Image (cartoon, rainbow, N blue to C red):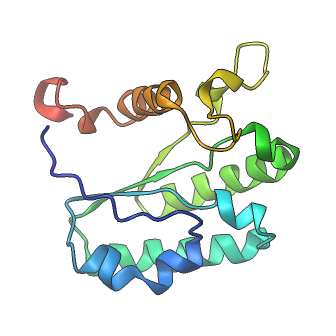
Amino acid sequence: AQYDVINAGFGGSCFEDLWRLREPLIYALRPDVLLVYEGDNDLFDGVPEHLILDAAERLLQELAQKLPTTRVVVVAPKASPARYHLSKAYLSLNAKLKSLVEECGATWVDFWSAQHYESGALRDDLFLADQLHLNPMGYTVWVWSLREQVPWLDPSKVGGN
């Protein structure tokens, strides 16, 4: 409720798409808060990890220069049953992205662990029949994780901090 939300995302996007379209998707909107979710399609499409990290670093560094007051939040690529065969690659990318995001002064959100049971098994109850996209329960868990890890986004928190 404290933010006007504009969903500028589109299906199938990768970090290079966000880099290429950053003017209309980010700079033209001049957001107070920017949530970035990329990397999931990159890995599935076979983009090498170092190229994903390079695009992320270029974007984060430029954002810090061009929009210094914008709070940037990067959400970790999620697990999904359809792509779980790539889980080691996702975990590697997430660890490196986390370091990069924090080095660039942005906020990292890990959704991966919230998608798994304590036993380590992936929660398949969070996905649509395609086993890739989140269902309403999956989005509820995602929002809960976001609010837990970035409390200043939650308007119910005193002072938003």
Write the residue at 17% across / 23% down: 156
Front-most of residues 104 and 54: 54
x%, y% of residue 147? 35, 31
Front-most of residues 127 and 89: 127
Quarter holding residue 126: top right
Query: Could you tell me if residue 123 is visible in this image?
Result: no
The residue furthest top is: 118
The residue furthest right is: 85
Q: In this view, does 97 lie above or below 75?
A: below
Write the residue at 88% across / 45% down: 85
Q: In which quarter of the image is the N terminus?
A: top left
Q: In this view, does 116 lie to the left or right of 148?
A: right
Q: Is residue 84 above or below residue 12?
A: above
x%, y% of residue 15? 57, 72
x%, y% of residue 136? 47, 29
Query: Could you tell me if residue 154 is visible in this image?
Result: yes
Write the residue at 68% across / 35% down: 129
Q: In this view, does 126 lie to the left or right of 74?
A: right
Q: Is residue 37 left or right of residue 6?
A: right
x%, y% of residue 21? 42, 83
Count every numbered label the image shows and give the total.
0
The residue furthest front is: 129
Q: Is residue 17 above or below residue 100?
A: below
Q: Quadrant of the C terminus?
A: top left
Write the residue at 71% across / 13% down: 118
